Image (cartoon, grey):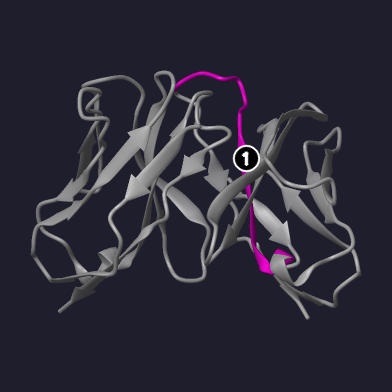
């Protein structure tokens, strides 16, 4: 079946450091790919998405490119802030974001 | 525009009881999905309702059920609770039209503890 694998956390960075969170997927078809973020005590918020190969999703300084050849959707940010501390989930879906398959989540901690 | 609301936010039940959780979607959204989040299994899809019909279902036992009303509000029910049902239950709503531009919006969740 379909699955999503993320790098295990926690990832601890200093403020203004470069962030990469790896995400790879296994899929039988051509899914849409998503990054969601969960702040403490809250639900998930969509951070960005890409619906086809070579698409780049971007939002709030975060970027991820849909790489079909490597089945990857790595999340990057050039300069993290303390406020970026949260858990990040990579996910895939075949039907416009409904019925999401999630990775295990990666906790990011940014220190001042 | 009000976001997705879930009630109650916290629940404590004992094994063998049943529980009903409620989700009110964003106005105009017709699709409601439910997810279970646990430390061990992560986020898992339970089911999706669209226009009062279950459209998709995850791999959960029949003790987990749901329904959707004509105003798109949804409830999920868990019968004969087990300790392993302790989790954060998240509801998400979307327009449900199936377009790639559609987006799911999540509620804050209901934290269920089974003792």
Tell me if B13 is positioned left or right of A17 in this view.
right
**Image: B15 above or below A48:** below
Residue under the point 29% across and 39% down: A24
Residue B47, x across and y down, in percent:
70, 39
Tell me if A57 is positioned left or right of B89 in this view.
left
Q: Magenta segment, which residues?
A: B85-100
- Element at label 1: strand
Residue under the point 20% across and 41% down: A63
Q: Chain of mark 1?
A: B
From this viewpoint, is residue A91 visible? no
| Magenta span contains residue B28 | no
Q: Nearer the viewer, residue A18 or A4?
A: A4
From this viewpoint, is residue A61 visible? yes
Residue under the point 9% across and 52% down: A78
Mark 1 crowd level (few <14, some 14–19, many ≥20, 10 Å Cα): many
Residue under the point 39% across and 19% down: A30
Residue A34, x across and y down, in percent:
38, 38
**Image: B69 above or below B61:** above
Image quadrant for the C terminus of chain A?
Answer: bottom left
Tell me if B77 is positioned left or right of A64 in this view.
right
**Image: A35 above or below A93:** below
Q: Total of numbered circles in the picture?
A: 1
Residue B56, x across and y down, in percent:
69, 30
Query: Residue furthest toward the front?
Result: A1
Tell me if A91 is positioned left or right of B25 in this view.
left
Q: Quadrant of residue A73?
A: top left
Q: Which residue is mark 1?
A: B93
| Magenta span contains residue B91 | yes
């Amino acid at each position: 079946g379909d699955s999503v694998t993320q790098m295990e956390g926690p990832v601890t960075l200093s403020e203004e450091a470069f962030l990469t969170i790896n995400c790879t997927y296994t899929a039988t078809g051509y899914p849409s790919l998503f990054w969601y973020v969960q702040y403490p005590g809250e639900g998930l918020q969509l951070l960005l998405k890409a619906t086809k190969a070579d698409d780049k999703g971007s939002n709030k300084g975060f970027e991820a490119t849909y790489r079909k050849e490597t089945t990857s959707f790595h999340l990057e940010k050039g300069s993290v802030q303390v406020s970026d501390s949260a858990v990040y989930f990579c996910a895939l879906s075949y039907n416009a974001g409904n019925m999401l398959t999630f990775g295990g989540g990666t906790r990011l901690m940014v220190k001042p | 525009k009000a976001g997705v609301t879930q009630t109650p936010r916290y629940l404590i039940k004992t094994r063998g009881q049943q529980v009903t959780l409620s989700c009110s979607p964003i106005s105009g959204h017709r699709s409601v999905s439910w997810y279970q989040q646990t430390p061990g299994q992560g986020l898992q899809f339970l089911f999706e309702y669209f226009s009062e019909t279950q459209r998709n279902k995850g791999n959960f036992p029949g003790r987990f059920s749901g329904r959707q009303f004509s105003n798109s509000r949804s409830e999920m029910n868990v019968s004969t609770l087990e300790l392993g049902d302790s989790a954060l239950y998240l509801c998400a709503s979307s327009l449900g039209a199936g377009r790639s531009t559609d987006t799911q919006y999540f509620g804050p969740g209901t934290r269920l503890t089974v003792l």
